[in-house]
Each structure stands twice: as C-alpha cells, then as structure tokens.
C-alpha cells in the first residue's frame, strides 16, 4: 500500500475524515517548523546517536516490540538490583 501512494516507513501522514472514511495523505515536514537553535540541537543529538551506533553502542535488532519491551524491563531490573546492592 505504501508503494502505491508513495510513502515510506516513518513518513508523516495527515489524516482527515471524509464522508465516514479516514483519508491519509503524505505530509511534507518543513525544517522551518523548527527554530535554528532547535534544529542545531536535533542535528547534534542525531550525530551523537549515529557515532554511538557506529561504535557498537546499540541494542537489537528486535524481532517484535514485545521482545524489545522485555529487554528494557530486564535492563531496568538489573539496574535496580545493582543500586540496591550498593
């Protein structure tokens, strides 16, 4: 369906109600929606994240969202146990 309407995973869609149906249309996001300072912070965080990923500081891939949530719960439990041991 995405190919038929020319959208990709992560694209922003605009939803409208028309005659009892929901119509989804691709919505272009303009970088002008952010101030220069906001854009600078976003770009810096993206650059940091990419650098960390290249250094192997990432987790996954996960096959399902349930697998990811279970992983996160395990991490939180391990950190909590570590703090209690101090």
Image (spheres, rainbow, N blue to C red):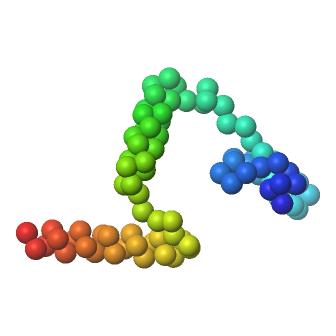
Is 9 in front, or is 29? 9
Of the 4 image quadrants, the one containing the N terminus is bottom right
Is residue 17 visible in the rendered image? The answer is no
Q: Residue at x 15, y 68 (%)?
A: 83
Number of numbered markers: 0
Question: Could you say where residue 38 lies in the image, as x and y percent from the top left?
Answer: 47, 30
Is residue 15 visible in the rendered image? The answer is yes
Extreme-top residue of the structure: 36
Q: Residue at x 23, y 68 (%)?
A: 79
Q: Is residue 33 left or right of residue 41?
A: right
Of the 4 image quadrants, the one containing the C terminus is bottom left
Question: Could you say where residue 80 lies in the image, as x and y percent from the top left?
Answer: 22, 71
Q: Give the quadrant of residue 51.
A: top left
Q: Residue at x 73, y 51 (%)?
A: 8
Q: Give the quadrant of residue 85.
A: bottom left
Question: Could you say where residue 46 lies in the image, as x and y percent from the top left?
Answer: 47, 40
Q: Is residue 20 left or right of residue 58?
A: right
Q: From the viewer's perspective, is residue 77 above or below residue 53? A: below
Q: Give the quadrant of residue 64.
A: bottom right
Q: From the viewer's perspective, is residue 51 above or below residue 75? A: above
Q: From the viewer's perspective, is residue 33 above or below residue 48? A: above
Q: Residue at x 51, y 69 (%)?
A: 62
């Amino acid at each position: 369906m995405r190919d038929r309407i020319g959208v990709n995973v992560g694209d922003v869609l605009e939803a409208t109600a028309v005659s009892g149906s929901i119509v989804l249309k691709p919505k272009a996001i303009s970088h002008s929606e952010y101030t220069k300072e906001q854009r600078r912070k976003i770009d810096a965080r993206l650059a940091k994240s990419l650098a960390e990923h290249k250094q192997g500081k990432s987790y996954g891939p996960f096959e399902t969202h349930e697998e990811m949530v279970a992983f996160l719960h395990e991490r939180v439990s391990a950190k909590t146990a570590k703090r209690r041991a101090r």
